[in-house]
Amino acid sequence: MEGLLNKENYQQIEAFINVIFIESGLSKNTCESYRRDLKSFAIWHQKNFKTRGQISGADNGEILRFLGYKAAQGISSRSIARSLSTLRRFYKYLKLQNTISIDPTHLIQAPKIGRPLPESLTENDIDLLLKAPDVEELLGLRDKSMIELLYATGLRVTELVELRMSQVNLNQGFLKIIGKGNKERLVPAGDEAIFWLKKYLHKTRPLLAKKVASEVVYLSKRGEGMTRQAFWYILKRNAKAQGIKKHLSPHTLRHSFATHLLNHGADLRVVQMLLGHSELSTTQIYTHIAQARLKQIFSEHHPRG
């Protein structure tokens, strides 16, 4: 796509990406999303404003036209809002660099988006899933420990597969998690998850660790760190074995962790802290799930439901 961009636009986009990657600590995937959004805008802008195709010179009206163009193409409100968010960050960067004096996105409002409720498993489904791995097998014991720990802590899948031995305190039953933005949080793991983690560390990990020296807690059969995709496959395989037909991903267990805590009376701010959410509003979506579950129970069991 670089060949379609003029030199100035390409250089400004890449300079911006380098800055946010280094200074903000964003993941490569997030930076690539920013790059795609900016290239899409730059190519559209060059085509429609050939006499001044540099996006650093775009004004408010041109950006509104671009967003309208995307809407006319049937692009979802969520994607349009993400594009606008990218443009806002880009023009804020240009203003800080003194490349522009006025931010053309300043008065543009993002389209309203209805947030979908995250899916979660029932407590019965969780019980079935936790019984699936064959703990008499070395890898089955590893899988059991991973699923137990994920449900007990609500970790993001990346936090689980990148968990290092130095982050685990078995005596106190806590994990020191390095989350998004390199923020640290202490997460209690619970007796059951710690029990299975100890068994895995005693029986399985020493055999896997003989192949490759690694500080990562959960290892593949080759002795290397697990990938997110590998754990996703393990999760789906065990769910299928138990006849669980719901859409399932590692994030489903994170959602289930939060939902079940709220269903059993946990304080919302405690759940926020455990999940590592920087904003309470992000956690509040789980209260809707808990309320929906209460309505379902009422309709199923109340004689006038």
Image (tube, helix red, strand yellow):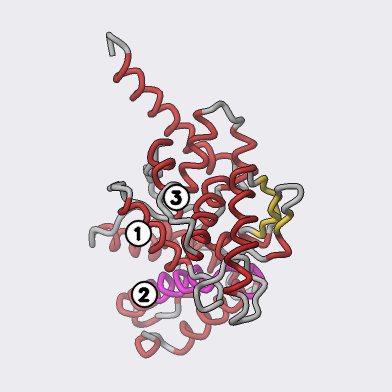
Instruction: Return the residue at label 3.
Output: 109
- SS label for mark 1: helix
CB within 8 Å, label 1 to label 2:
no
| Residue drawn at point x = 35 percent, y = 60 percent | 67
Q: Quadrant of the C terminus?
A: top left
Q: Amino acid at mark 1?
A: Arg
Q: Earlier in the sequence, mark 3 or mark 1?
A: 3
CB within 8 Å, label 3 to label 2:
no
Counting from the top left corner in percent of width and height, residue 264 is at 53, 28
- Give whichever of 94, 23 is nearer the camera: 23
- Give whichever of 266, 100 is nearer the camera: 266
Q: Amino acid at mark 3?
A: Gln
Residue placed furthest toward the top: 304
Relative to 93, is 157 above or below?
above
The answer to whether residue 37 is left or right of residue 207 is left
| Residue drawn at point x = 53 percent, y = 43 percent | 282
- Res 237 label: 1
Q: CA distance from mark 3 to mark 2?
A: 20 Å
Q: Kindly report the secondary structure that dominates the magenta region of the rendered protein.
A: helix
Relative to 133, is 292 above or below?
above
